[in-house]
Amino acid sequence: MSSPSKRREMDLMKLMMSDYKVEMINDGMQEFFVDFNGPKESPYQGGVWRIRVELPDAYPYKSPSIGFINKIYHPNVDEMSGSVCLDVINQTWSPMFDLVNVFEVFLPQLLLYPNPSDPLNGEAAALMMRDRTAYEQRVKEFCEKYAKPEDIGAGQEEKSSDEELSEDEYASSDDEGVAGQADP
């Protein structure tokens, strides 16, 4: 590899040519979304998450920053921000790894083998240590509520599109008496 930018381009192309759906953010190659399926034979099976990936300038010498866009119940993922415990990737990252490794090795390993002793979500860690069955049930509830395949990207669209109102929102806005309406 001649330079980090060439390596970034090559790794990104390799990821795009794999089975993952990749959506670029802005025009650069620094930030993008990847749709990630929960590992089979785990409580996350059937869930689909949109992952935000940010590549540092020093990539591949420095690990990418990874965050879940839709909610996931996991001890090592911050419930509010979706950020992944950086130690998980940073401790094992090497320039020998590429972006496909993140989605075929790192994230599946994270979901299959959570580390409740170093949590970003204390509630998930406590429940996992106290009652593994209840923890797995909560994981499945989050998958059903926030990680259905048809919901992927819906959160992003809702944030950027406010011109469409649902029928309920439209009906409630009628009740508020809009200025300038003619009397019947």
Image (cartoon, grey):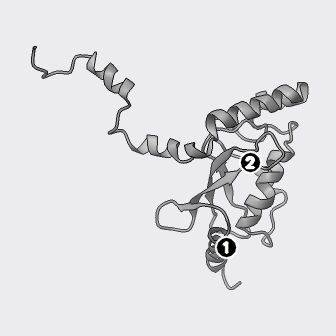
Which element is circle 2 on? loop
| Residue occupied by mark 1 | 14
Task: List x then y, in percent, for residue 136.
Answer: 82, 32
Q: Quadrant of residue 119?
A: top right
Q: Which residue is rendered at x = 73% and y = 35% of the image?
A: 73
Q: Quadrant of the C terminus?
A: top left
The reply to whether discs 2 and 1 touch (Cβ–Cβ < 8 Å) is: no
| Residue occupied by mark 2 | 38
Q: Quadrant of the N terminus?
A: bottom right
Q: Is residue 133 visible?
A: yes
Callout 1 environment at 10 Å: few (<14), some (14 to 19), or many (20+)? some
**Amino acid on which the number 2 mark rests in the picture:** Gly
Q: Which residue is rendered at x = 65% and y = 62% of the image?
A: 20
Q: Which residue is rendered at x = 71% and y = 44% of the image?
A: 46
| Residue 155 falls left or right of residue 71 | left
Task: List x then y, in percent, for residue 157.
Answer: 45, 45
Residue 134, above or below 120? above
Q: Is residue 126 visible?
A: no
- Label 2 to label 1, Cα distance in Å? 21 Å
Task: List x then y, in percent, for residue 43.
Answer: 80, 39
Viewer-nearest residue: 17 or 160:
17
Q: Which residue is rendered at x = 53% and y = 48% of the image?
A: 153
Residue 120, above or below 17? above
